[in-house]
Image (tube, rainbow, N blue to C red):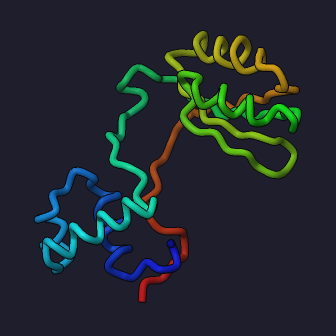
Amino acid sequence: MADALDETDHRILDALAEDGRMSMRTLAENLHISRANAYARVERLRSTGVIRGFRAEVDPVLSGLGTSAYLTLNVRQADWRTIRESLRRLPGVAHVALVGGEFDVILLVRARDNADLRRIVLDEIQGMAGVISTRTLLVFEEIEPANTSRPSGEVRA
């Protein structure tokens, strides 16, 4: 589906990534397209899975999760599906990715404080069957990218 997106679709995605609460009327006006066209395109982008949903972007620190860390895991490959589901359900795990390289999985974990992070890492994650080892990388500061809706270097026609 991604190959079939035209410039207007990309402009819609950019606008909604900036403000997911934007009304269809405002979207249509900003992009100089009809409201019916905006509705139809957004619905097509939703139904084909390009737009996966609309969510509130919550500040982790202001919501009480002041400690963040990236964790790398080495796992037994045969246990990956079970580990993946356990990580998906574990409160505090904000992102999970299976990767290639010197480790198998990378996670973004958000916790109330260092004691909560310790509990998540040592008790929950290291206690999962199939987790061989972990490495914890504390996050000191997070910087939001200027534009997250398009890959870096992509040029518009």
> At which x and y percent is residue 89?
57, 25
- On the image, the x and y values in percent for residue 27 come to 19, 66
The quarter of the displayed image where residue 33 is located: bottom left
The reply to whether residue 147 is in sight is: no
Q: Considering depth in this image, is 148 or 41 the residue closer to the camera?
A: 41
- Left of 133 or right of it: where is 68? left
Q: Where 146 falls versus 87 (above or below)? A: below
Who's the residue at 64% across and 17% down the image? 120
Image mark count: 0
Asked whether, in this view, residue 34 is left or right of residue 58, the answer is left
Can you give x and y, in whole percent of width and height, for residue 1 in the image? 50, 72
- Say if residue 146 shows up in the picture: yes
The C terminus: image quadrant: bottom left
Q: Is residue 13 above or below residue 128?
A: below
Location of residue 148 in the rendering, given as x and y in whole percent from the top left corner: 45, 59
Residue positioned 32% across, 79% down in the render: 8
Q: Which residue is depicted at the point 73% across and 45% down?
A: 98
Residue 55 figure quarter:
top left
